[in-house]
Image (cartoon, rainbow, N blue to C red):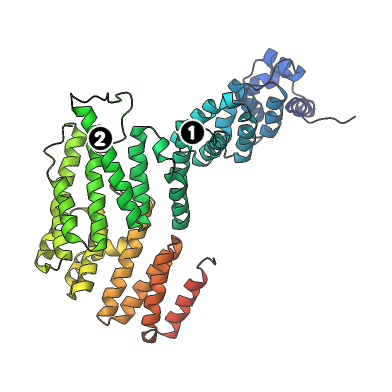
Amino acid sequence: MIHTTTIRSELETYLKKTGLTINQFGELSKINSGTLSTIIKGVRPIAMQQLDRIVAAMGLPEGSFYELYLEECFSYPLNWRRLKPFLYRCAELDKLELIQKVVRYMTDNLAYVPLLFDTAEVLLNQEKRSAAAIIYESVAESEKYQHSERLALCHYRLFTISIGHDQEKNLRAATKFEGFVERLDEIDQLDALKDLANTYLSLRQWGKVDEMSKEMGRKATIQYHHKYNQNSRFKYNLLKKPKRPLFLYIIYSHLLRSAVCDEMGNYELALKYVSLYSDLSWVKEDTAEALRIKEEFKILALVNTCLYQLMMGQVEVLPQYVAYVESREAEILPALIKIIQAANKYNFNIDFVLEKFESQISSYAVKQANIGTYTYQVVADRYTHFLSELSLYYLRSQRYDIGINCLLDCLASAIEIHSDSAILNCVRMFEKFRDFTSVEVQNKYNTLISEVPKK
């Protein structure tokens, strides 16, 4: 006869080994002795909380017997009241394989799909991202032939979860999700387009940035009109609101499109977009957050007007531009990039600016955090771009040692975020100035290059 191991058999063995009575173990586990007796006899199933108390009383690690518990759950008809707390506990203890088993089994019955989706939403809010991703993937797979909003939401959540340091993965995630945006609720579409625009911004995919930001601005403008125009034939959905004030999506669209024009060298058109977010007299929101945003964009308009004038060769605005940005910590890095770009383009000296921000430059490191409206990958890309421009500035002025060191730092940063374009740019620059480097520096360069993932 084959004896199957169960939680009950393990508990019985433990009681015999220790000599504890059911009453004594009940006191240890804080479970009623009568309840324990019925559990051991198999009269009633074990609840999740009871399992954790039994495991703790036996002196075992958290999560012990979870595999056995799952087998027991599957031996009965599906019971969401038992499986839901089990999923939460597995997420807490990072038992992802067990979550996969539960979800795979439950999605065979489409009636459980909405419950699983809601569970994933809770887990995501609790920062249990890996556990949530498993459920979203299973729900999306079970509904892949349904053109539902829930399917689109699953892909949106998976997109946001997958965005990280690896730019190649970020590009794949953005490309995969993009086709699902139109299936989202009209409110969710605004945040989805914003997130896509930010991701493409970090990837320097300027055509996509312009496309996403233009569409975000168009949709937000329509919704704004419907919300505040009393004569509108459409009823604005008051039950759901975007994460940020509605007008922000409109002016952020202008901000992003001005950045695209800047990158394309079309500074006159960039200034036109600046004018669209400099006058915000049309904004009807008057909350504290709205007033703060309006003030922030008013300052941004002044700063960016100076910036685009500087990029057009009006060097005389540089002191004013520096004065604007020095009190805005989050804007110093992108401002320095543009100043160095202008210096490289128009061949003027900015040593005084670099000295002014020496402490900030020395403390810069890519951090996984949100800075202003921009996400981590934007900051990571900017830091790499900064090092690239700075190395060119020093190399152009024949300060080869400093320039090459900056270039190697840039290469290391580019490799970390898997930015192929930045890596190739570093390689081209190094080969151009290789004759000005020592054998030691060349060895360091070769070591870095060896870390580039093979395609």
**Residue at the (15%, 43%) spot, across then down:** 295
Q: Is residue 145 left or right of residue 245?
A: right
Quick one: 3 or 387, which is closer to the camera?
387
Tag of residue 222: 2
- Dot 2 crowding, Cα within 10 Å, few <14, some 14–19, many 20+: few
Q: Secondary structure at mark 2?
A: helix
Q: Amino acid at mark 2?
A: Ile
Q: Amino acid at mark 1?
A: His
Residue 139 found in image quarter = top right
Q: Secondary structure at mark 1?
A: loop
* Residue 447: image location, x then y, percent: 50, 74
**Residue at the (65%, 19%) spot, across then down:** 27
The residue carrying mark 1 is: 147
Q: Quadrant of the C terminus?
A: bottom right
**Residue at the (15%, 55%) spot, across then down:** 271
Quick one: 234 or 105, which is closer to the camera?
234
Residue situated furthest left in the rendering: 316
Residue 56 found in image quarter = top right
Q: Is residue 373 left or right of residue 291?
A: right
Residue situated furthest bottom in the rendering: 435
* Residue 281: image location, x then y, percent: 11, 38
- Dot 1 crowding, Cα within 10 Å, few <14, some 14–19, many 20+: few
Q: Is residue 290 left or right of residue 281?
A: right
Tag of residue 47: none
Sequence-first disc among 2 and 1? 1
135 w.r.t. 406: above or below: above
